[in-house]
Image (cartoon, helix red, strand yellow):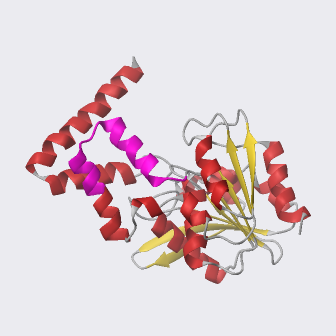
């Protein structure tokens, strides 16, 4: 019953946006973009932080009108930067951090735009990458690890900024083609071509990005450093085929296929392999 109600509610929103697109297309596209880019989960309460984040040193960084939060578990000069995904926050790394701390490394996790304790209502990859760039200038990372849209942000970041300090990257459950994400959204709400074209033009005009080039596969083709790509064969949020696309264009990468982990990718065996990739083959 809940699923039926959710479907009816979702389609009703889509119908409203479609009707509005004939009356006021600018407003309709704005609403559609807001629904697409504004996370509904992943916020944190500063007074009630998860225990793993309470163990860290917190720091707020400012970028233009925005600010974002970082959490630092201090160690040696080797720095690992962790980048979470959609509707999540820095605490999602709680299970991985103990495996990374065994190396003695300094670990830094950040809250993305409109997530955790960071500012804003809108999440977008270019802004998230700008956050990474800012903190990387203060704390140059040796390794970069991302999950889901955070992983795609890592790919975008390294392709655009070409940070020479980063030696290796780990990509978990990353989507590749932005068109797939956008088309799924259009299909879910049954939105018309006016809205689709408006959203496409927004990315082109606002972010200077063509949808065909806004893909993990394209970004990976620009990356020269070694990478570990891990993806679950039963991931229903981001299909395994997306990881295969990324791996096909990333020359110096290894693809690990897991089974039964879903999109979250939390697993002791996988985390051991991540640590092995980063540290044992140095």
State whether residue 130 is above or below residue 191.
below
| Farthest residue, direction left | 23
Residue 122, x across and y down, in percent: 39, 59
In the picture, measured across the screen, residue 191 lies left or right of residue 84, that is left
Magenta portion: prevailing SS class: helix
- Location of the N terminus (image quadrant): top left
> Observer-nearest residue: 25 or 179?
179
Residue found at x 23% / y 53%: 29
Residue 251, x across and y down, in percent: 71, 64
Residue 108, x across and y down, in percent: 69, 67
- Visible residue check, residue 173: no
Residue 18, x across and y down, in percent: 19, 41
Residue found at x 82% / y 63%: 278
Residue found at x 74% / y 40%: 258
In the picture, measured across the screen, residue 102 lies left or right of residue 108, that is right
Magenta segment: does it hold 45?
A: no
Magenta segment: does it hold 186?
A: yes
> Observer-nearest residue: 109 or 233?
233
- Visible residue check, residue 128: yes
Residue 274 lies in what quarter of the image?
A: bottom right
- Location of the C terminus (image quadrant): bottom right
> Observer-nearest residue: 3 or 214?
214
- The magenta-colored residue range is 176-199
| Farthest residue, direction top | 1
Residue found at x 57% / y 65%: 219
In the picture, measured across the screen, residue 183 lies left or right of residue 205, that is right
């Amino acid at each position: 019953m809940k699923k039926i109600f959710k479907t009816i509610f979702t389609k009703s929103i889509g119908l409203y946006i479609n009707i509005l697109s004939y009356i006021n297309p600018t407003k309709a596209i704005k609403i559609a973009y807001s629904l697409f880019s504004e996370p509904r989960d992943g916020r944190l309460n500063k007074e009630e932080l998860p225990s793993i984040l309470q163990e860290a040193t917190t720091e707020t960084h400012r970028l233009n009108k925005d600010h974002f939060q970082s959490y630092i578990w201090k160690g040696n000069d080797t720095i690992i930067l962790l980048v979470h995904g959609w509707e999540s926050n820095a605490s999602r790394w709680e299970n991985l951090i103990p495996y990374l701390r065994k190396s003695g490394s300094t670990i830094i996790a950040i809250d993305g735009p409109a997530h955790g304790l960071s500012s804003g209502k809108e999440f977008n990859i270019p802004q998230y990458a700008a956050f990474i760039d800012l903190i990387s200038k203060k704390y140059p990372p040796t390794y970069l690890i991302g999950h889901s849209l955070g992983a795609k942000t890592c790919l975008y970041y390294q392709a655009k900024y070409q940070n020479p300090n980063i030696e290796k990257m780990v990509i978990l459950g990353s989507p590749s083609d932005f068109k797939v994400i956008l088309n799924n959204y259009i299909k879910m709400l049954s939105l018309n071509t006016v809205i689709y074209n408006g959203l496409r033009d927004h990315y082109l005009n606002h972010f200077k990005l063509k949808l065909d080039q806004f893909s993990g596969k394209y970004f990976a083709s620009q990356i020269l450093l070694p990478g570990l790509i891990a993806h679950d064969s039963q991931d229903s949020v981001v299909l395994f085929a997306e990881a295969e696309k990324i791996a096909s264009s990333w020359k110096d990468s290894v693809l690990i296929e897991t089974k039964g982990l879903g999109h979250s990718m939390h697993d002791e065996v996988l985390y051991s392999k991540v640590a092995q990739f980063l540290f044992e083959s140095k």
